[in-house]
Image: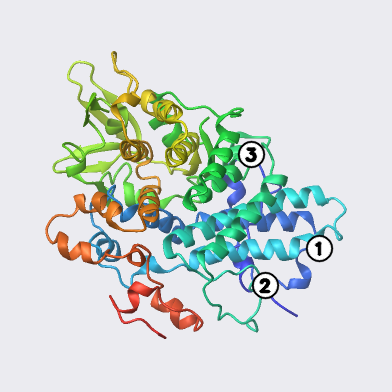
Amino acid sequence: MKKIVSILGLIVLLAGTWGCSKSWLDIKPESEVVLEDFWQNESQVTQVVAACYRSLTEYDCMSRMLVWGELRSDDVTYGNSVPSDMYKMLNIDISPSNGYCQWGSFYAVINNCNNFLHYAPDVVNKDANFTNSKLHSLQAEVLTIRALAYFYLVRTFKEVPWIDQPSIDDAQNYNIAKSPEDTILNHLESDLTTALKYARDQYDTNVYDKGRVTKNAVRALLADIYLWRQKYDKCVQMCDQIVNNPGDLQLVDGKDVLSKVFYQGNSTESIFELQFDDDNQFNKVLHDYLGYYGNENGEWSFPAILVTGQYSPFGYLTSGGLESENDLREKDFLNEKGDKYYVFKYAGALRRENPDSKVSSYFYRNTTANWIVYRLSDIILMKAEALIQLGTDNEEVMNLINMTYMRSNVEVGTEPLKLENYNTKGDLEKLLLRERQRELMFEGKRWFDLMRLARRADSPSPLLNYVMKKISGSSGIQTSKMSVMDALYLPIHNDELKANTALTQNPFYKTTGDNAINQ
């Protein structure tokens, strides 16, 4: 008899049904569960779906969402007590032995999803309460979770093994070669098109609306993939389905963004966020990296050179004057301490500003935070980026950028940004990147934003123009380590190469860093 050797170590046994609080992600591992005894009823099926969500929130997976999406960008520099592997990556000293190059946590997510997709359809024939309609709805969620995991892998490593069958026993062949990027992304587009057909518009509670996959969550991921693949028309179409028909989605007032979006969570502008709570699944990654009450200086800080002066996204000088001179996001997202600017977004609960002195007092959270994967402002700016590349409606581009810009620039007399001050496509591209940086810093977006810039140019140079501003000293040496496009992707970890002999190392790292294995 076969034993479920992978998934059931992560299975979530629910206390009753999928309740109204975050406790639906409580984990109680089972062991020695025989395959023939599982997959018998709807309750067991929903346990596996919960495990798919839960595996996204595990420390190793969450840490890589942040590190892969943010660390190497111009948003992050050394904070307090930076771990060795993180220090090396910040210094562009990346080798196949670096722990952040391990991808096992994402393949654990994928394997959980594969188990569901393989076995759940048979349960329809075993449990009369588990209908095809329920199956399709859950399949939409699981396909989207799997697609999200693969999208992180592709953006980080470019080529990875495509695995769509569950790992259930030791007799299987685990030596699987990498698939081309386009092959994987084609799979994801197909899966998400199916998911969009069956996903729910909404659930019965706000926690589920934000913490489980909805049609808008599927649309957001599809839009992101289309933008990555330079399918700009399709990106705009998908964004329009969210922006033009928002339903209950709406931007939070600028003065409330810190408290409602990042402290309380599950706000009106949230589309999909991973759910954490103080009792069962604590978001230790955000505590470690960004800080919290009792440890306000996290491992990350924002480069001081980007806070003021010509390189800063705040108080940026244009032909029409200073842009974002009094931007709420500079005060709400950063906290100056000595010569460092530590992260206050996610780490903070409240900022109070003295109306006379304009000095702010910062109050940190002692609770855990959700992790936002997609929110409305991200979609608005995705659409603006796609429209810039299409070159069809610059007035709409400016209107979209002003939607996020003006809610955070509320000083009396502040005027919307004017198209006449951004005369070229290049000017608009740079404005869009500044606005996405101001709006989305520390949300795991910036490195991928800069990667899209490099991919459009088929050169690392545009990316390096941003990243190298934060690096003092041997900039020539650092630049040489990112001199070709392959160097912008991470190497495959040595342990993965040992475990899977069908893998080959990413090209740049065959001759740099640690000696690769099995080349």
Is 487 on the left or on the right of 502, as rendered?
left
Front residue of this view, candidates 303 and 264: 303
Going from N to C along the chain, the mark reached first, 2 or 3, is 2
Q: Is 482 situated above or below 1?
A: above
Amino acid type, label 3:
Cys
Q: Position of residue 97 (x, y in %)?
A: 34, 74
Q: Nearer the viewer, mark 3 or mark 1?
A: 1
Residue 77 shows in the view: no
Front residue of this view, candidates 71 and 299: 71
Query: Which residue is at 66% across, 74% downward?
Result: 168
Q: Position of residue 470 (x, y in %)?
A: 20, 50
Q: Could you say which quadrant of the image residue 320 lies in?
A: top left
Q: Position of residue 360 (x, y in %)?
A: 23, 27
Residue 473 shows in the view: yes
Q: Is 500 situated above or below 446?
A: below
* Quadrant where the N terminus is found in the figure: bottom right
- The residue identified by callout 1 is 122
- The residue identified by callout 2 is 4
| Label 1: element kind | helix
Amino acid type, label 2:
Ile
Query: Which residue is at 77% across, 48% downward?
Result: 134
Query: Which residue is at 75% across, 60% downward?
Result: 120
- The residue identified by callout 3 is 20
Q: Could you say which quadrant of the image residue 345 lies in?
A: top left
